[in-house]
Image (cartoon, rainbow, N blue to C red):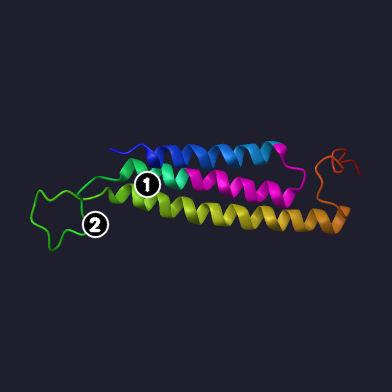
Amino acid sequence: MSVIPWLAAAWLFAIGLYGIVTSRHYIHLIACLSVAQSGTYVLLLAIGFRWNAGPPVFFDHPPGTPAVDPVVQALVLTDIVVGAAVTALLLTLALQVHKRKGTLDPEALRPMRR
């Protein structure tokens, strides 16, 4: 078992989290959130990976043949779709904030009063 995918997932999550914490622009914040979420893709794929295993298609494999976990692959695909939907929603909200307030700086938008 290799530790490289685990390190890559931790690195992606750490870089994304650092960008979220230090962001001064909402578009940058949304991009960093996407980077942090891509760390979860790598982590899930690292969990479901098996050495010397084939794809999870069993119609032409004899019983007992090792295969990668198809549930983890389905979770990664679901995570990608949810991540794309959340990113699209956040970008739409950022666009509306820019239209109404004229800025995307979180500090300038701090007092949200009518």
Residue found farthest to the bottom: 60
Rendered location of residue 21, percent (x, y) = 69, 36
* Residue 44 appears left or right of 95: left
Going from the N terminus, do you reach mark 2 or mark 1 first? 1
* Residue 14 appears left or right of 102: left
Rendered location of residue 56, percent (x, y) = 23, 55
* Residue 95 appears left or right of 64: right
Return the residue at label 2.
55
Return the residue at label 1.
45
Q: Is residue 29 magenta?
A: yes
The residue that appears at 73% across and 54% down in the rendered structure is 93
Q: Which mark is residue 76?
A: none
Comparing 35 with 83, the one in front is 35
* Kind of residue at badge 1: Leu
Task: Please say if 93 is above or below 40.
Answer: below
Q: Which residues are magenta?
A: 22-39
Q: Quadrant of the N terminus?
A: top left
Q: Is residue 69 magenta?
A: no
* Residue 47 appears left or right of 93: left
Q: Quadrant of the C terminus?
A: top right
The residue that appears at 39% across and 42% down in the rendered structure is 5
**Secondary structure category for the residue under label 2:** loop
The residue that appears at 32% across and 48% down in the rendered structure is 71
Callout 2 crowding tier (Cα within 10 Å): few <14, some 14–19, many ≥20: few
**Secondary structure category for the residue under label 1:** helix
* Kind of residue at badge 2: Pro
Residue found farthest to the left: 62
Rendered location of residue 23, percent (x, y) = 73, 42
Comparing 3 with 114, the one in front is 3
